Image (tube, helix red, strand yellow):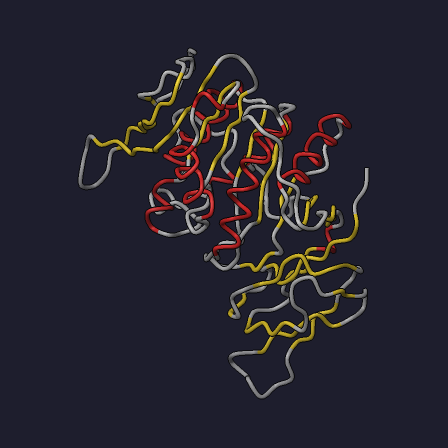
């Protein structure tokens, strides 16, 4: 594999067996003129077959993938694999070590940095390597996310609505096989440059997730994360065995209208009137924002513009104008 990149690696992606190593990102800092940022990586390869590419820690305050992927790398025997599994448990390593959504090195959001730049800042350099070196190897791309600090999310596997019907059906089937309660079809309202968007545009079967909330997880969330990774690998015949059936059939839902993403009209303290999975009707008040400077004034009431189930709501009471305070979804079908 020959890619014009600054990143180097200890991994031979064509080697059979299990390898644990790292990606090296050259850096120059105030305290070290010559330095390297290390991104741990595991590759398990056996025979020929599809390649699955897994990421955790795209945002540094989302830990489900960072915990789950190393456990799988330790547990999976190469003899169980037909194809290749590539796992990077903390893609935005500086953010993961700092526990922040954005990189503390350059202030950038990894999930708005794609396709990246060879000679950009550290976040762009990593995105450039993923796009140009790792995506071409992959048939299946999985980017494990949660709500981070700011959002409470119903547990879901998610994706965009892509134009290719075969690819779209493959993503929905993979999402259902994961076994989370919801398969969530969403649209971008927070900017461009998402890792999943670029993988989808290359025709890859691509899954994101929203598996935890408020920068924390439970044993149940970690169980859903781990079982889901195994299920998807088994569905695609990369790992031996068959997917484990979910206790309840996942529901496929979508937030396809911009109005489904309710933004705060003013700054203040957000008080929600609904919780996750509640049903909301257009015109209903979904919450209110209290004025911190004039707390005895009537709060600003926010109304829904669409019908739907509450898929996500803001976790942090302190809210700025333009922050997303609630997401509504409806049943989705192709």
| Residue at image coords 59%, 33% | 232
| 15 or 268, nearer to the observer | 15
Task: Find residue 144 and report its horizontal and vertical position in percent.
Answer: 52, 41
Task: Find residue 160 and report its horizontal and vertical position in percent.
Answer: 68, 38
The correct choice, above or below, for 46 with respect to 157 in the image is above
| 1 or 288, nearer to the observer | 1
State the image quarter where residue 322 is shown.
Answer: bottom right
- Which image quarter is the N terminus in? top left
| Residue at image coords 61%, 52% | 155
**Furthest residue toward bottom:** 296
Task: Find residue 218 and report its horizontal and vertical position in percent.
Answer: 48, 57
| Residue at image coords 70%, 43% | 185
- Which image quarter is the C terminus in? top right
Left or right? Give the position of 256 relative to 114: right
Task: Find residue 4 and report its horizontal and vertical position in percent.
Answer: 41, 16
State the image quarter where residue 270 is shown.
Answer: bottom right
The correct choice, above or below, for 177 with respect to 331 in the image is above
């Amino acid at each position: 594999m020959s890619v014009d990149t600054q990143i180097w690696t200890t991994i031979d992606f064509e080697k059979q067996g299990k390898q644990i190593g790292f990606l090296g990102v050259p850096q120059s800092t105030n305290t070290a003129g010559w330095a390297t940022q290390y991104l741990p990586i595991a590759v398990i390869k056996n025979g020929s077959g599809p390649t699955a590419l897994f990421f955790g820690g795209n945002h540094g305050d989302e830990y489900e993938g960072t915990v789950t992927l190393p456990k799988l790398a330790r547990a999976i025997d190469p003899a169980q694999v037909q194809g290749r599994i590539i796992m990077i448990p903390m893609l935005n390593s500086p953010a993961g070590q700092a526990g922040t959504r954005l990189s503390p090195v350059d202030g950038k959001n990894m999930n708005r940095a794609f396709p990246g730049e060879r000679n950009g800042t550290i976040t762009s350099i990593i995105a450039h390597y993923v796009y140009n070196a790792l995506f071409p190897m992959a048939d299946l791309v999985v980017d494990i996310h949660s709500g981070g600090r700011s959002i409470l999310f119903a547990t879901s596997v998610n994706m965009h609505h892509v134009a290719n019907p075969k690819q779209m059906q493959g993503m929905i089937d993979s999402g259902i096989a994961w076994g989370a309660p919801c398969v969530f079809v969403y649209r971008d309202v927070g900017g461009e440059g998402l890792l999943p968007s670029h993988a989808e545009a290359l025709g890859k079967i691509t899954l994101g997730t929203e598996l935890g909330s408020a920068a924390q997880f439970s044993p149940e969330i970690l169980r859903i994360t781990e079982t889901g990774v195994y299920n998807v690998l088994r569905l695609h015949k990369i790992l031996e065995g068959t997917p484990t059936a979910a206790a309840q059939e996942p529901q496929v839902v979508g937030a396809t209208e911009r109005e489904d993403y309710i933004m705060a009209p003013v700054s203040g303290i957000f008080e929600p009137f609904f919780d996750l999975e509640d049903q909301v009707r257009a015109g209903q008040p979904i919450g209110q924002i209290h004025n911190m400077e004039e707390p005895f004034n009537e709060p600003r009431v926010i109304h829904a513009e669409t019908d739907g189930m509450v898929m996500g709501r803001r976790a942090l009471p302190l809210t700025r104008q333009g922050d997303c305070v609630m997401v509504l979804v409806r049943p989705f079908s192709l």
